[in-house]
Amino acid sequence: MGILFLFVSLNLLSDLVSLLLRAGAAVAGNANGWIPPWNGRKMFLFLSCLSVALGAYAVLEASRIGIVRVRIPTDRLPPSIDRVRIAQITDVHLGLINRGGMARAIAERVRAERPDILVSTGDFVDGQIAHIDGLAEIFRDIPAPRGKFAVLGNHEYYAGLRHSLSFTRSAGFTVLRGESVTVDNALRIAGVDDPTARAFGGPGELSEAQLLGSGPPGPFTVLLKHRPAADPDSYGRFDLQLSGHTHHGQMFPFRLLTRLAYPLLAGDHPLPGGATLHVSRGTGTWGPPMRFLAPPEITIIDIERVPAPAR
């Protein structure tokens, strides 16, 4: 499926270039227009081979999970704590395709960073949730002395909410569904369900703004939210939002379409009220185990205490 997507994209690009060259030749006075020297069978074979080569690279890119580092200075950590390190994984899509090899690779990278807290911002499991026995233990064994927390994405509902919750909790995560917890009097972590919950009868009594309350001053607040959509009613009520869902398009040029739905596609984005929204490119893959110009990531967020500004 991934190779076919690349093949169709390359054909559209080839046709667009040919059309522009023909139009340019016609404007220049060439009545016959421009005829490409390579067309028909030769172009088909060339684009087919190129698609296979790019597909092989995309499989390799998907297997190379990088580390993205984010530093957030704040004066709202208690004096006894200089830094809280959070590791974010998202869109792992454990299931039929992404299995033990990916789980062990993620666990190894996270363990090497020695996070205080591990969070999963949705789509931890895929729509095909069968045959994932033994994977929960891999994540449960990752040290995270200040806790592991997760929110639900859309695929947890597609896979079956009861099974998804059971697996995520077995992996050692506390699932936050319109809830917040305070960790060691250092920071508050709040989590909301994906909007898909409404179609499945999920919790909807408490709005995001109500959950967050009046906002700072108070504990440094991290909002876990699967989709990178900012709620204006929540501005000023949290300090950092961690999201995923977009995969950064996963395979270019699909990113161009993804950006239409989610303009805050990847990276760090300042929000009104002084907060930061970090959108992860995702740690796993959905559909074909391929990524093209959208490498997977584990995000390491260092929340560091700085002196309060002088008054």
Image (cartoon, helix red, strand yellow):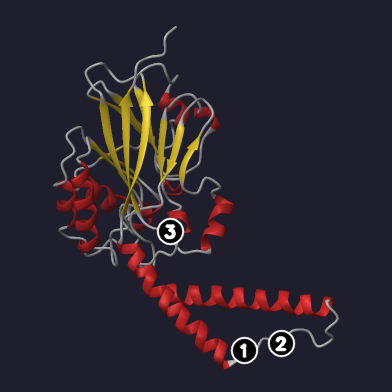
Q: Element at badge 3?
A: loop
Q: Which residue is mark 2?
A: 35
27 to 230, vertically: above or below: below
10 to 224, vertically: above or below: below
Picture coordinates of residue 114, whole percent (x, y): 19, 40
Query: Which amino acid does the dot numbered 1 rest on?
Result: Asn
Query: Which amino acid does the dot numbered 3 rest on?
Result: Ala
Q: Which residue is mark 3?
A: 294
Q: Which residue is mark 1?
A: 39
Q: Identify the residue shown where x is 44% and y is 76%.
A: 3
Residue 1 appearing in the image: no
Question: Which one is nearer the viewer's eye here, 149 or 76?
Answer: 76
Query: Which amino acid does the dot numbered 2 rest on?
Result: Ile
Q: Quadrant of the C terminus?
A: top left
**Is residue 241 rendered to the left or right of residue 40?**
left
Picture coordinates of residue 238, whole percent (x, y): 43, 27
Point out the tag, 3 or 1, that comes first from the N-terminus: 1
Q: Which mark is residue 30?
A: none
Q: CA distance from mark 3 to mark 1?
A: 31 Å
**Is residue 43 rendered to the left or right of residue 70?**
right
Residue 215 appearing in the image: yes
Q: Identify the residue shown where x is 52% and y is 32%.
A: 271
